[in-house]
Image (cartoon, grey):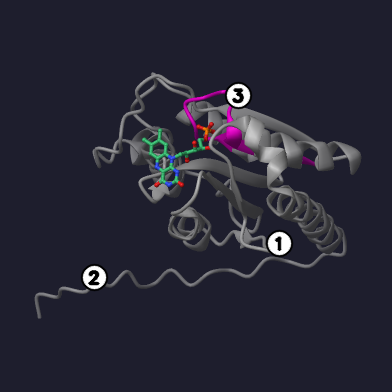
Amino acid sequence: MKVLMLNGSANPDGSTMAGLREMAGVFEAEGVGSEIVQIGGKPIADCIACGRCAELSRCVFSEDRVNEFAEKAKEADGFVFGTPVYYAHPSGRIQSFLDRVFFSQMHAMGASPFRHKPCAAIVVARRAGTSASFDVMNKYAGITEMVTVGSTYWNEFHALTKEDVPGDPEGTQTLRNLARNMVYLMKCLEAGRLAGIEPPRPEKDHMTNFVRKN
Ligand SMILES: Cc1cc2nc3c(=O)[nH]c(=O)nc-3n(C[C@H](O)[C@H](O)[C@H](O)COP(=O)(O)O)c2cc1C
């Protein structure tokens, strides 16, 4: 059992990373593997809607870790997406990164690497914008039939730098409870699979745009 985590900050060792590490500690204690992928500080291209992912089953851009992350996702049993708050939204880089991961996988051949897997977003800010950022992050899970995991508070904590993180004990407690809930859900899903419970087949007959010609 393995959780794939993403640090959506350009800072590989900042507050977001401290939050992800808090959760990784719980996963380790519970005997669940985890890996933290760093989004890094280099430019991340946005989706250009070229549609090539439908032919290639991957994003046409290969200068960053988007395709690598999508490959790793196939083997993962759960996901944590961590982001700092920038002007009351998630970092631009994590949005560009996840837009391309999810759009390319939506158009790729084969089974979705995300469907019915637990997913949690965690957000960190000095002061404000956490709820709005959390809402944006959860949208990726909602449109891909993932299981959004909750905690004892919304998945947010407060810090300007990583040194501040221990100063928000309710925030770190929320992260640890979130990690435990993820482990519990992953075990439940595994038990269901072993008991022969089949996932439902989704209806996909309709894709109705709001603006119609007739
Ligand atoms: C461009 C930018 C915009 C930011 N906007 C906000 C904000 O809207 N609200 C807030 O409370 N903190 C804001 N911050 C502070 C960061 O969210 C905070 O320092 C966070 O801990 C950084 O996480 P990191 O070390 O993982 O990058 C902003 C920081 C930057 C660099």
Residue 59 lies in the magenta-colored region: no
Where does the image place residue 120, in percent across and percent down from the top left? 62, 53
Q: Quadrant of residue 212?
A: bottom left
Q: Which residues are magenta?
A: 1-16
Give me the residue at 46% from left, 30% from top: 66
Residue 2 lies in the magenta-colored region: yes
Direction from residue 58 to residue 123 in the image, left or right = right
- Spatial CA distance of label 3 from label 1 is 24 Å
- The single residue placed furthest to the bottom in the displayed view is 214
Q: Amino acid at mark 2?
A: Asn
- Spatial CA distance of label 2 from label 1 is 35 Å
Q: Is mark 1 within 8 Å of ligand 1?
A: no
Q: Earlier in the sequence, mark 2 or mark 3?
A: 3
Say which of 17 and 170 sits in front: 170
Q: Amino acid at mark 1?
A: Ser
Q: Is residue 40 above or below residue 169?
A: above
Say which of 176 and 87 sits in front: 87
Direction from residue 191 to residue 96 in the image, left or right = left
Label drawn at residue 198: none
Disc 2 designates what residue? 209
Disc 3 designates what residue? 13
Say which of 108 and 160 sits in front: 160
Disc 1 designates what residue? 151
Q: Is mark 3 within 8 Å of ligand 1?
A: no
Ligand 1's quadrant is: top left
Q: Are marks 2 and 1 in contact (CB under 8 Å)?
A: no
| Mark 3 crowd level (few <14, some 14–19, many ≥20, 10 Å Cα) | some
Direction from residue 81 to residue 67 in the image, left or right = left
Q: Quadrant of residue 1?
A: top right
Where does the image place residue 14, in percent across and percent down from the top left? 58, 28
Task: Say which element carries label 3.
Answer: loop
